[in-house]
Image (spheres, helix red, strand yellow):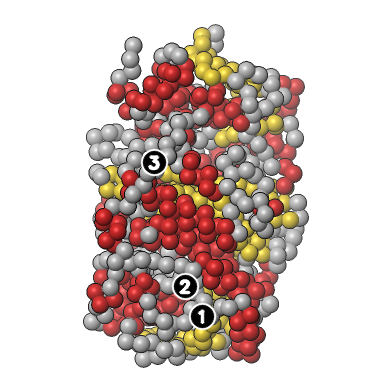
Amino acid sequence: MAVTQETLDEIALSRAEYNLILERLEREPNAVELGMFGALWSEHCGYKHSRPLLRLFAQDESTRAASRVLSQTGAENAGAVGIGDGLAVVFKVESHNHPSAVEPLQGAATGVGGIVRDILAMGARPIALLNSLRFGPLKDPQNRHLFHGVVGGISWYGNCIGVPDVAGEICFDESYSGNPLVNAMCVGLVRADNIATAAASEVDNIMLLVGAGTGRDGIHGASGLASRTFEEEVELRPTVQVGNPFLEKVLIEACLEALSTGLVNAIQDLGAAGLTSAAIESAASGGRGIRLDLAQVHQREQGMSPYEVMLSESQERMLLVVAPENVAVIKAVMEKWDVTCHEIGQVIAEQIAQVSVGPELVADLPIGPLSKAPEYRLEGKPSQADIDRLVLELDSVPLPKDGSQETLLRLLASPNIANKQGVYRQYDHQVQTNTVVGPGSDAAVLRIKGTKKAIAVTIDGNGRFCQLDPYQGGLIVVAEVCRNLSCSGALPLAMTDCLNFGSPERPEIYHQLEQCILGITEACRVLEAPVVSGNVSLYNESRGQAIFPTPVLGGLGLLEDVAKATRSAFAGEGLMVALLGADTDQIDVNDLAGSEYLKCVHGRVAGSPKIDINLEKRVQQACRDAIGRGLISSAHDCSEGGLAVALAECSIQGGTGFTGDFTVDNRWDAVLFGERQSRIVVSLPENDWDALANLAASIDVPLLKLGTTGGDRFQINGQVDLPVSKIADVWNNGLELAGG
């Protein structure tokens, strides 16, 4: 009997895709089989529209970074990068956007739990969490509800499992109203020779399901929730998972101990599409098949159907693959930690998936067609509105009548710039005692115990730049992530990406996705920091309105000497302040493109953002070299809000005044608040100026004196003269006054 359109809509398959399934199977699938196809062919699991583009991230094996990369991108649960001393850092970012829009607390909490299990599935101990969050304006009660729920979910889950939340970003824009972005990143540490695999390659190995009981939460999470746009009439709450962080904590310890025995041949977490995805992907990676008995799956609800068991996305579950003779040892480890462990199946040689309930066969499918979703390579095209937004004339941007001083205060109070301490003080960022530099600086720094080394981690994105010019925006987001790492003194090693976009079936959205990926690829090539893991979140739109195209990049950097870790705050009085990367007297209207000033003061998102990625590389090298030689005392990326805001943040965080004597012409808005790329504010002792100037000149990096630190006032050459206490008060309270 032909399947109904209602059924196909429920699992987000098109009629053409259903016909392709019939062609591949040469028969009609039953309900369980169709559900499995729907999950694995969903956008969330199958990457139908993005996989052809993601191949652009393929790494150049000749680069400096390539020798450090220990995992093939996309082949495992996360990226692994060697840092020397026999150690590797494992990291990844993933989205939980749609669940968080429906149930913000549980959606965000289970996003944390899921990304932690991805790191655990690599055999690594999770050592840090980061978040990239975006919401609509807080004046809207629904956006406030989402904001407080998401922050509450992240703090509840992360604090309970004992993994520090060390860095992140929070942005607000109308395009995210009803479509919040909740991207969670986790970082783990493992011995390089102990990295685990998800590939089940040994025939007759036993599949052990460990952790929570399987319930009805999360069914159709991958296909019905994360792979289509929101419709008002659809009830989505049953698709949201429910988390138990206390169980996750013991699951982490139990799995790490099991892995330490050397007897676990493969490990996979149960995330999107639950048991279907975990078991099928594990078998497909190993070139094998599986035989599962759902009667052996421990369930926490009565009367669950095979369909529900296979597609449930209940949290805190892992799949371990173990040789028969070693099952008893692994079961004993799980029993020690009071973690439930059941034998649910075995690996077989034939590449098929046979699923039964006791003796009754409920699914019998070939692994190949099931695990290989169709791919779509579409043609993108910008809309006329996209083209029109690129035009920005300086004459069309009048100077604010209330002057530069009031404009600075207005920007410091903007929720996109204001201090986020009210959020991150809810997170424990010191647990595990590795955090050297925590939230509030450009990047977090974590010591690697037993060595002199440290890693720097950060996460960033800018939807406005990508909305205006997705290629340049892709370049800029990578540049800013690497710049944040370089400001800490770390050499950027690798990236993880989360690509948040609207429906790729719309030509203008596909154009954004393609161009952003091309920009990211080029920036990663030049800066020698390849993408090693990631996630794609599409269909982020409702009622015909897509979010800004928002690629979020998480970055990993390495410091050979933790003692040289550098912060963004001015490090005392009597220091010179300088700008690496650009001269302020070169006015360009595109400095205002996509800026917080243009949006906050003039209500516009327009212009053509630009970056010289080769200059960016030299600026970052100059910053790192200066830190390594002990020349500079602080370094801060000049980004949202421009130069004046960057200087104010350094002054506020350092608790010291600043006197600026650099030239500001009649277009003070472009000089003070333009967001020209490739600029870093640094402070240094006066007697180190010549050495810094020589270093910068040797690699063709512009350098400009800006002023000096000291006193209790923040002053810029006739434009601004305010007590540091005043700008600090505005910056510290801006988010709360906006509703945060």
Measuring from the top left, give residue 304's x and y in whole percent: 44, 19
The residues bearing labels 3 and 1 have C-alpha atoms spaced at a distance of 43 Å
Is the Cβ of the residue at disc 2 closer than 8 Å to that at disc 1? yes
If the image is split into quadrants, where does the C terminus sit? bottom left
Can you tell which quarter of the image residue 723 is in?
bottom left
Q: Amino acid at mark 3?
A: Leu
Q: Does residue 521 sit above or below 542 in this rendering?
A: below
The residues bearing labels 2 and 3 have C-alpha atoms spaced at a distance of 37 Å
Camera-near label (3 vs 1) is 3
The residues bearing labels 2 and 1 have C-alpha atoms spaced at a distance of 9 Å
Q: Does residue 700 sit above or below 559 in this rendering?
A: below
Residue found 24% across the figure and 44% down from its top: 543
Q: Amino acid at mark 1?
A: Leu
Residue at which label 3 appears:
378
- Label 1: which secondary element: strand
- Label 3: which secondary element: loop
